[in-house]
Every structure is written in structure tokens, then in C-alpha cells.
Image (cartoon, rainbow, N blue to C red):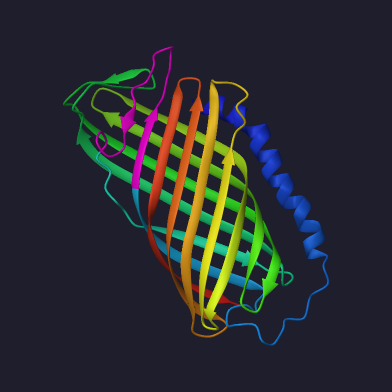
Amino acid sequence: MNVRLATFFHRAGLSAGTAAFVLMAAPAWGQVREQEPSRLPLGEQYRIELSGTLWNPAMSGLISSEQFGIIGSEIDFEKDLGYAQTRFADFRLVLRPSRKSKFRVQYTPISYQASTNFTRDIVFNGIRFPVSIPVDSTFEWKVLRLGYEYDFVYTDRGFVGLLLEGRYTNFTTQLTSALAEEFTSVKVPLPAIGAVGRVYVIPEVAINFEVTAFKFPDVDPKYKANYFDWDISGTVNFTNNVGARVGWRRMTTYIFVEEDTGDLKFQGIWFGAVVRY
């Protein structure tokens, strides 16, 4: 599964995503620094912004893996593997060379572990895991986002901007029992485009929204991919340099390559803090 996915997505995703990021970087860093209006609300006068969050998403998903010409079972992460809702950290960095330009980095590592007994025979990577045999499973999902944001509308009450991203997704699934041990690993670099905005209801409080998406063109019924990520949050700034945030995020990904499938959804509330310089 991982070999086909790497070959299929590497050129389309990595070249498009990283090229967009690099090409947009050069003119942005070369811009003359714009003077910040003194009437800007708290939290809008900075060059570097660091934030960390704790995300508590509910997760649902299906995955299947074919091997040796044997079609894999659709494995449900909740019903078959018994994964429970778990809290994870999320890290974000914003570099702001000018008032309307921002370079963004976001890293979201997610990991689930569980032990269960299958209530049916499961075929994974061409190997059968029989019913009632104890199985240990691990699922890891890591998403690194590199983006460039340009706020084409910017006022003292908020902004609206365009977001271009290169997104690198790496997820691994492993099943281990007394009879067999199998794993599959998928590394998918893909581009994305989206919109971002912020509205200050008062100078110390902002409402934020962000949405990015990608859909692979329908060039071959054997290959399909799409994802959708949106985030709505509120920020309370105690000073220009320190604030607190709370939000709700939904992230979905669907990948189909020949007979291999991954269909995942994460959604839930997050809490965090932000510092700026």
C-alpha cells in the first residue's frame, strides 16, 4: 500500500505544495516593512507568533489494505479496534515579515492504542486475523502543514486572506496477535488552498475562521483522494504579546488507491495559549 501511494502522490503533491510555498516566499520576504497603524487591536502587532493547543477530537475511520491479490477487510477504528476519544497536542508557528504576509507551520501528531478481540475474521495486508483472538493495535497520524497566507483585505477590525499550503501526512497502522504481526505505512504530500479570516468584536477579543481543502482530479477510478480541514475559534488577548484561545476543528481525509482505502475523520474542541514577539 505504501509503495503505490508514495509513487502516486509524490510528484503531484510534493512539487505543487512545496513549489507554491517557495515561490510565494521570495517576494514576501523582500517586501518593505509596512508601518503598523497605532489603532490596531491587541494581538496584531508582532513578527513571530507561537501557540500550543490541546485537542480532544472524536475519531471515526475505516481502513483496508490489500496484499498478494487478497482484498482487505474494512476495519472500523471504533467497532473493530475499540479506539476511545483521546487528547493530543498541536503546535503552530507564524512568521510575519509584513502586515499582510504570513508564513505558517503547524504540526499535529495523533496516536491511538488499544487491545481488543475481533468479533469477526479480519483480513489485513493479506493476512487473516481470526475471530476472538486478542489483537493489539496502534494507529499514528502525523500532519505537517507549511503555508503562506496573504491577507488581501486588512483593516483595524480584522482581515480576510488566501492560504496556500503544502501538507505532509504520515499515518501508520499496526495489528499484532499471537498468530501474526502486520503493519502498513502511508506518506502523502499534497497541496491545498483555502481561506482565513478574523473579526475583532472588541479590541481584545477576536473570532477566527480557517478552511483548507484539496480534491485529486478524477483521472482514474482506481485513484481518489480528498481532504477538508476547517477551524473556528475565539481569541482573548490579555496583552499584545499573550492570549488564550478556544476552538472547534474538523479534519477529514479520504484515500483510495486500487483496493487500499483510508477514510478518516477527526473533530472536537481544542484549548490553547499564544505568545507573540
User: Is 118 situated left or right of 104 in this image?
Assistant: left
Q: Looking at the picture, how far across and down is residue 23, in whole percent?
A: 78, 51
Q: Looking at the picture, how far across and down is residue 189, in whole percent?
A: 60, 40
Q: Please report the residue visible at 76 percent of the width from the left and 54 percent of the height from the top.
A: 24
Please check the rendered image and state whether residue 30 is part of the magenta-colored stretch, yes or no.
no
- Which quadrant holds the C terminus? bottom right
Q: Please report the residue visible at 57 percent of the width from the left and 46 percent of the height from the top.
A: 213
Q: Is residue 244 above or below residue 178?
A: below
User: Is 211 situated left or right of 83 in this image?
Assistant: right
Quadrant of residue 47 within the rendered picture: bottom right
Magenta-highlighted residues = 59-81
Q: Looking at the picture, how far across and down is residue 238, in whole percent?
A: 49, 84
Q: Please report the residue visible at 58 percent of the width from the left and 30 percent of the height from the top.
A: 6
Q: Is residue 175 above or below residue 103?
A: above
- The residue sitting at the left extreme is 132
- The residue sitting at the bottom extreme is 38
Q: Looking at the picture, how far across and down is residue 197, in whole percent?
A: 59, 64
Q: Is residue 136 above or below residue 258?
A: below
- The residue sitting at the top extreme is 69
